[in-house]
Image: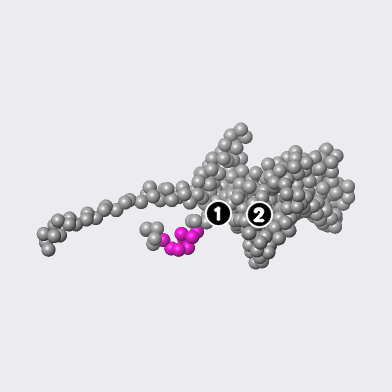
Amino acid sequence: MSASSRPAWWRELIHRPFFWGIVAIAALLALNVIKDPGYLAISVNPANGNLVGNLIDILRYAAPIMMIAIGMSLVIATGGIDLSVGSVMAVAGATSMQFLNAAGAPTSVGAALAAVGLSVAIAGVLGAVNGVLVAYVGLQPFIATLVLMMAGRGIAKVITGGQNTSATNDPFRWIANGYVLGFPVIFLLAVVIVLIVAWVVRRSALGLMIEAIGINPRASRMAGIRPKGLLLTAYILSGVLAGIAGLMSVGSVMTVDISRTGNQLELDAILAVVIGGASLAGGKFSLAGAFVGALMIATLDKTVLFLGISSSATPAFKAIVIVVLCLLQSSRVRGWFGRRRATPSAPVPAASPVKEEVAA
């Protein structure tokens, strides 16, 4: 079937960047199935009726990445970047564990809600600091967020006294380890938050204004858009979502490890955003693409562990997969392969003018 005869929906689908993220997820799962034919099996735990299996583990692992990827999408769409999300996760996790440890209320719902509210509020304040430095002080986003990236873990150490803090609170643990209708609460919560953010930015003018200041801040300002307020909003949202991701991370083990919580997750978030089709130059973002990119990163990390790839070779393996995926997304690369597959038609010989005159 020729390219011109393909259905329009199929041509549109394969040109969407997140389509290749879905293809990558399917390829990674197929690779795991080759090693273990029962890799995709999902069963029901007879003790509690919850779903168990490798796919469920991937969904649980992907939830924190989804949170920071969604926030990173909004920041990158403005033409900026947020390198501090991993450190903000550590600060939020340290705040929640320290608060619950001091409260000493292992079954209190109120203590769990207070810990969540306090941690998210502090994360939002840290995001606001980034926003003020970028929008009002005029620092480059890379420098402004790099400062908090380095200082954030120091703040977390101050909160916990330099110790890995543990706490006990069943309602808080349920957020990360509980199930609803057989599915992990942490994943369902991430999906709900993604849908809410997507509805807000796409059903209002917020998304268009964010893209506008990412494309051309001066032109958007002349059109009546106030870039400073939008920049501040984007960084606050990034901080809040990173704080929620931090709560998800520490809630699974009820312990915060200052040096490991959120470590290098800012890189995974940036990769998820790029895989989803966003432009690092700003002005273009896709929350659905970031969602798929986060799932792909989680699947890739779980595949690395499942295949038993050594820790020294893990970065190289991830780099190869991501580079191949980015090449598949490139319209120039796809066009090059399309030209190679196309067979040029034979030229039609032109009639000789001499013969035409003789015939006349």
Q: Amino acid at mark 1?
A: Phe
Q: Residue at x 72, y 56 (%)?
A: 228
Query: Residue 75: in sight, yes or no?
Result: yes
Classify mark 2: residues with Cα within 10 Å, few (<14), some (14-19) or many (20+).
Answer: many
Residue 18's label in the rendered image is 1
Q: Residue beneath label 2, please?
A: 78
Query: Residue 199: in sight, yes or no?
Result: no
Q: Quadrant of the C terminus?
A: bottom left
Q: Is residue 135 left or right of residue 268?
A: right
Residue 330's label in the rendered image is none
Q: Is residue 328 left or right of residue 212?
A: left
Check disc 1 and report its element: helix, strand or loop.
helix
User: Which of the two discs, 2 and 1, labels the residue nearer the N terminus?
Assistant: 1
Q: Position of residue 216 (x, y in %)?
A: 62, 56
Specify whether residue 360 is painted magenta: no
Check disc 2 and report its element: helix, strand or loop.
loop
Which secondary structure class fits the magenta region best?
Answer: helix
Q: Residue at x 51, y 44 (%)?
A: 324
What span is colored magenta in the figure? Answer: 6-13
Q: Mark 2 to mark 1: distance in Å?
A: 20 Å
Q: Residue at x 84, y 46 (%)?
A: 98
Q: Position of residue 79 (x, y in %)?
A: 64, 52
